[in-house]
Image: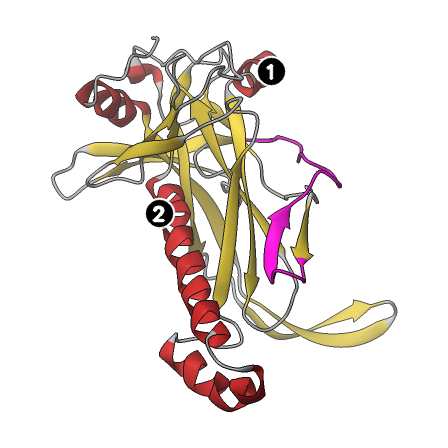
Amino acid sequence: MFEKAIENAAKFTRPIHSIQRAYKGKKITPGAATLFFVNDEGYALTCKHVIGLIANSEKINKKYSDFKVDLNKVIPQKKKVVLKGLERKHNLEPITTIQIKNRFVGCVDKMSGFKWHVHAKHDLAILKFEGFNKLLVNEFPRFKKDTSTIQQGSMLCRLGFPFPEFSNYTYDKTNDDIVWTKNGKESSPRFPMNGMVTRFLADDKNQKFGIELSTPGLRGQSGGPLFDEDGLICGMQSRTKHLHLGFDIEGKEIQVNGKAKKIDDYSFIHLGECIHVDVIKNFLKKHNVSFFE
């Protein structure tokens, strides 16, 4: 049903890869998010919460860098003595995230930076790449013009990059740093997820701003396009909510491998929430960003 639409969306949809580590331990945790380009000027769309994580990573990295500067001012013989005091000063706990590194994969040949506009109310942001010579995207989405055809029961599809499989990173023990490398797997497969429109989301003034789907948006799909069978953009994946169904089971005895076992089960339905295409188009127009309908 969505075969051609998915192939089309893949041409302008790209992953954001991230790696992070906590203060105690050298384990690196990979993560991902999604964006999709709007035009050949380097404008793309993603979630406001994704931009927030990217912006916050700079503060987190600086905080740990400041800690290391303070620690390196201490002579080696006294480092163990003053370490706990410096940890308290910089609010470092064993599970505190101390480093986050991000990469925009398959977006531009190079960049001097980027700027963004975030929506005042909704989980929506425009990202503008700067300083590139070549955009690594040459086809762009078409946004649905007549949105009245998006109705309860409509089947739509999302595309994004959950389940990160990339492994091109390591811990640099010499510099106490997490770094991207040329070794390992650089990509993760794209992952589509379809669903039925169940309800629409509205604000306090009953203004429609979102689309609810019968299936969850997966971690890593945030910022990915929502489209119909023809590949027309109908929205953007934002978040997933979890509604308690009330079909709770407590202390029920079942047979597992021939043995009796008592279980508890609390059932939830996981519903994806997407920003409506009308909100997206109005936001693009507000910031004079060209797009195709």
In this rendering, which labeled residue sits more in front, label 1 or label 2? 2
**Residue 84 percent location from the top left of the image:** 47, 86
* Residue occupying image coordinates x 55% and y 15%: 5
SS type, badge 2: helix
Is residue 125 something that shows in the picture?
Answer: no
Where are the magenta residues, as a range?
172-193
| SS type, badge 1 | helix
Determine whether 58 is above or below 88 in the image.
Answer: above
Residue at x 31%, y 40% (from the top left corner): 123
Answer with mark 1 or mark 2, whichever residue precedes in sequence: 1
Residue 150 visible, this orientation: yes
* Quarter of the image where one finds residue 291: top left
Q: Residue at the far left: name it.
A: 205
Residue lying farthest right? 258
* Location of residue 21 in the rendering, given as x and y in whole percent from the top left corner: 57, 61
Q: Is residue 72 above or below residue 55?
A: below
Q: Quadrant of the C terminus?
A: top left
Who is closer to the viewer here, 150 or 24? 24
Estimate the spatial distance between the alpha carbons at disc 1 and disc 2, rounded to whole Å. Answer: 29 Å
Give the camera-side residue of 268 and 8.
Answer: 8
**In contact (CB < 8 Å): disc 1 and disc 2:** no
User: Is residue 178 within the magenta segment?
Assistant: yes
Magenta segment includes 96: no
The circle drawn on residue 52 is: 2
Amino acid type at circle 1 is: Glu
Is residue 108 left or right of 54 when viewed as pictured? right
In the picture, the quarter occupied by the N terminus is top right
Q: Which mark is residue 196?
A: none
Q: Find residue 147 and report its horizontal and vertical position in percent.
A: 30, 16
* Residue bearing mark 1: 7
Could you classify mark 2 by the number of other residues whose Cα lies within 10 Å: few (under 14), some (14-19), or many (20 or more)? few
